Image (cartoon, grey):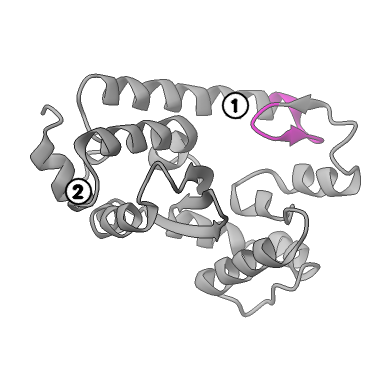
Amino acid sequence: MRYTKRTALQIRGETMSERECRTFEKKLAHFTAPTLLGIKCASLVSLSREEFDIPAYAAAFNAQAVRGGLQMQIMCRCQKRQLVLLYRPKLLQKRLEQPEIRRFLLRYGYTADMDLAACLMRLQNRIAEKPEFPHEIGIFLGYPLEDVDGFITHQGENCKLCGCWKVYGNVEQARRTFASYEKCRVFLCAKLSKGCNILQALKIS
């Protein structure tokens, strides 16, 4: 199925042109493909407020993509950009329920009884309050706990490998994961270049 203006407007709402929709989706495909394709619990992307009507897109996307187990949430609104978290609620909830993850997050004001929505609210508040970015966000993005902890302990220095994140633990496993993420990006970007939109590429109807 070709990408048509009617399809774009049905998915996005009439506040965005077809060109804006295509540009927005290309950014999503490039930066969040592993999450869109289901092998990563969440991805974060920074988008220009001048270039896109992000709240309108997020609302329209969520109305459609919820059937595919996807959710989009604006985490931070700055003067020129917004940080958007694209995530799979079931995968992210499962990750946050891991005992070692819960123990780690206790250090940063998360509590054992927080559900997914409460954890995301806490993260959102941490982003807004802290002068530096809250590094526990790596937990939400699916990074290995030992790498998130290592980054904090070493203040981002002395890593074994630098790729999608800084690696302090299993280098070979990280390399395989990086390669899988790249395959997702190439696959999804190719789908869009052939005329599909995001929901068509993901077979969400």
How busy is the neighbourhood of tag 2: few (under 14 within 10 Å), some, or many (20 plus)? many
Which numbered circle lies on residue 65? none
Question: Circle 2 sits on which residue?
Answer: 11
Against 151, is 124 above or below? below
In the rendered image, residue 183, in percent from the top left (x then y), is placed at 46, 22
Residue at the (67%, 29%) spot, across then down: 173
Q: For this view, does 102 lie left or right of residue 9?
A: right
Residue at the (70%, 60%) spot, across then down: 101
From the image, state whether disc 1 or disc 2 is nearer to you: 2
Q: Is 164 a magenta residue?
A: yes
Q: For this view, does 78 lie left or right of residue 167?
A: left
Q: Is 114 a magenta residue?
A: no
Q: As rendered, which of 85 and 53 lies closer to the eye?
A: 53
Q: Give the range drawn in magenta.
A: 163-172
In the rendered image, residue 162, in percent from the top left (x then y), is placed at 74, 27
The image quarter in which residue 60 lies = bottom left
Residue at the (52%, 29%) spot, across then down: 181
Q: Which one is earlier in the sequence, the residue at label 1 or at label 2?
A: 2
How busy is the neighbourhood of tag 1: few (under 14 within 10 Å), some, or many (20 plus)? some
The image quarter in which residue 79 lies = bottom right
Residue at the (59%, 48%) spot, across then down: 141
Q: For this view, does 40 lie left or right of residue 12?
A: right
Question: Circle 1 sits on which residue?
Answer: 178
Pointers 1 and 2 in contact (C-beta within 8 Å): no
Q: What element carries label 2?
A: helix
Q: As rendered, which of 5 and 15 lies closer to the eye?
A: 15
| Amino acid type of the residue that numbered disc 1 sits on in the rendered structure | Phe
